[in-house]
Amino acid sequence: MSFLVQYLATMLCYALVWFFLPTCSLFFFILISAWHFGETDLEKVPNTLLWRVAQFTLGLLVLGFLLFTHSAEITPLWSRLVRGNLSAEATWLLLVEYQAVILLNGSLFFILLAFFAHAQSRISLNLYRYTRLAVIFSFLLFFTPSTRFYLI
């Protein structure tokens, strides 16, 4: 019973913070989600700084990919969540405009991080899983209209 009470109290506090500071709460939610995605996709890694940053970077990439590939649906939702915060809305639109550059550079950064983290503390990698992820990013780069400008 104590877990349930603690969980409900935490959710109530977060709801109050979201009500009074929606933009900060949304930013915090994105950070937590990115950490969750990265920790799930890169599991059983050593507890080193490089691996933790690699996990978080991968989580940001996965979350960014999901949000950017559905930007038409996310943009009105984003506007409602930030409640007219013009700088947050402008930041989202800027991120959407440069999504291909962000995802490409983020992917390269993740690859470098994973390379150095693996050199520091070796782990066994599921190459099939990460090859599929690379293919998804490749399709994004090829089929996103704004990408063609940057690749040509």
Image (cartoon, rainbow, N blue to C red):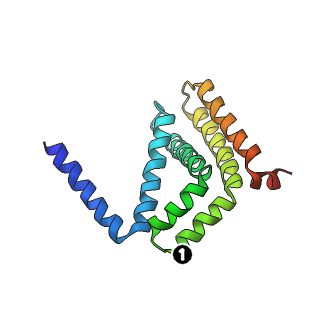
Question: Residue 62, how many percent across, how many down?
Answer: 56, 44
- With respect to residue 45, does 58 lie above or below? below
Question: Residue 5, how many percent across, how many down?
Answer: 16, 49
Q: Quadrant of residue 126?
A: top right
Q: Is residue 48 visible?
A: no
Q: Quadrant of residue 72?
A: bottom right
Taking the spot 81% from the left edge, 51% from the top edge, the residue there is 148
- With respect to residue 24, does 112 lie above or below? above
Taking the spot 56% from the left edge, 28% from the top edge, the residue there is 122
Question: Residue 125, how many percent across, how many down?
Answer: 57, 26
Given the current orientation, which residue lies at the most extreme right position?
152
- The reply, left or right, for residue 130 in relation to residue 4 is right
Foreground residue among 27 and 55: 27
Taking the spot 56% from the left edge, 61% from the top edge, the residue there is 75
Foreground residue among 96 and 30: 96
Q: On the image, numbered disc 1 is attached to which residue?
A: 86
Taking the spot 65% from the left edge, 40% from the top edge, the residue there is 111
Q: Is residue 120 visible?
A: yes
Q: How many marks?
A: 1
The amino acid sitting under disc 1 is Leu
* Label 1: how many Cα within 10 Å (few below 14, some 14–19, many 20+): few
Element under label 1?
helix
Q: Quadrant of the N terminus?
A: top left
Foreground residue among 116 and 84: 84
- The reply, left or right, for residue 108 in relation to residue 52 is right
- The reply, left or right, for residue 16 in relation to residue 78 is left
